[in-house]
Image (spheres, grey):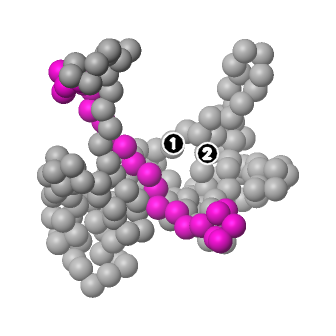
Amino acid sequence: MVLMIGIIGIDGILTPGFIFIASGTEDRYILKRGGIDMAFYKKQKLNGKWYLRAVTKGRPATTDDVAEKLSFMSTVTPGDTYAVLVNLGEVLGDLLSEGRSVRLKGVGTFFLSCQSSSRGVDTPEEVSPKLITAVKVRFIPEYAREQNNQVTKRTLISSKLIWVDTDETVE
């Protein structure tokens, strides 16, 4: 399958007419050109102004997909990798329920947060777990900073990422 698309690069310049080859099944696209990773967006109008919104394409990657990719990067079999990934959620839940955050090297940090429907109480004695209305797992992707405090690396965001308008994609 060959797609003709337009690309807006990091510099903001539109470069139409690049040809990309998509490999995979009909609902699973691996789109790359020269090692460049692609993300997709749609144009959206809100309150009279135009914005872009990131969108996903195809089916979500599964545990099997992740296990297969990880096994190619290591000496571990896809089956062993799959078994670890399937149990990861339970292990993270156990560690978070101990009141700890969990930092996975190359991925990021998971931690719990809670919400209350109350606007606060008048005394410290009134503060109790009964005020909690929701518990959420939060995530901060791993990143690195230089001495000037500028972020230099984000492990979950490819340095070769380009954004493609889904309206410009022709199949």
Where residue 19 sits, quadrant-wise, is bottom right
Tell me which residue sits at (69%, 67%) in the image.
148
Q: Secondary structure at mark 2?
A: strand
The picture places residue 141, in percent across and down from the top left corner, at 46, 56
Q: Nearer the viewer, residue 121 or 4?
A: 121
- Which residue is disc 1 drawn over? 56
For residue 40, the mark is 2
Q: Is residue 3 left or right of residue 70?
A: right
Whole-percent x and y of residue 128? 19, 25
Category of crowding for the residue at label 1, using alpha-carbon neighbours closer than 10 angstroms: few (below 14), some (14–19), many (at least 20): few
Left or right: 33, with 125 as reference point = right
- Residue 93 percent coordinates (x, y): 18, 49
| Residue located at (37% from left, 52% from top) | 61
Q: Quadrant of residue 109?
A: bottom left
The magenta region covers 127-150
Instruction: For label 2, count other residues whose C-alpha is less than 10 Å away and answer few (under 14), some (14-19) or many (20+).
Output: some
Identify the image quadrant of residue 21. Answer: bottom right
* Disc on the earlier residue, 2 or 1: 2
* Magenta span contains residue 164: no
The amino acid beneath tag 1 is Thr
